[in-house]
Image: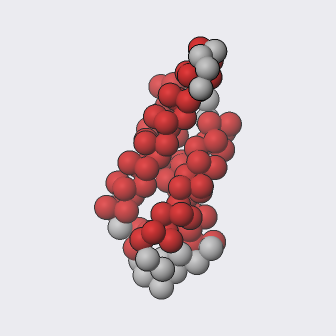
Amino acid sequence: MGWLGIAFKVIPMAVEAIKTTEKLISGRDRSEEKAATAVDLIRSMLHSVGEGADRDILNRPEVETALRGVISSIINLLNVVTAHSASGRPS
């Protein structure tokens, strides 16, 4: 599968991993622990759907770094959307 197909699978997985991690681990000062948990969840999901099964790509350090970047970007987006919604400003 090409990079675009993997991206279309990883992004929804990352959103779900972030939501699940937020429910399991509370506290703002635990962001590193939350990120590690979300990466582990995504990695598990990718293994379960067979992505990377023919390669050891999911265990490569650069893949974890990229996953952490995706997670950070999604969290930033969710924070902006939440702040915008809370402010009561029209869309």
**51 relative to 66, above or below:** below
Q: Position of residue 78 (x, y in %)?
A: 54, 35
Residue lying farthest to the left in this orientation? 62
Which residue ends up furthest to the bottom in the rendered image? 54
Q: Quadrant of residue 81?
A: top right
Residue 35 appears in the rendering: no
* Quarter of the image where one finds residue 87: top right
- Residue at 43% x, 42% y is 73
Q: Above or below — where is 48 with respect to 74?
A: below
Q: State the image quarter where residue 86 is shown.
A: top right
Answer with left or right where residue 59 lies relative to residue 9: left
Q: Position of residue 50 (x, y in %)?
A: 58, 78
- Front-most of 8 and 39? 8
Horizontally, residue 39 falls left or right of residue 69, namely right
Question: How far across and down, in percent of the image, does residue 21 sit?
Answer: 61, 42
Residue at 47%, 25% in the rendered image? 29
Furthest toward the front, the residue is 90
Q: How many marks?
A: 0
Residue 54 at what x, y percent from top left? 48, 85
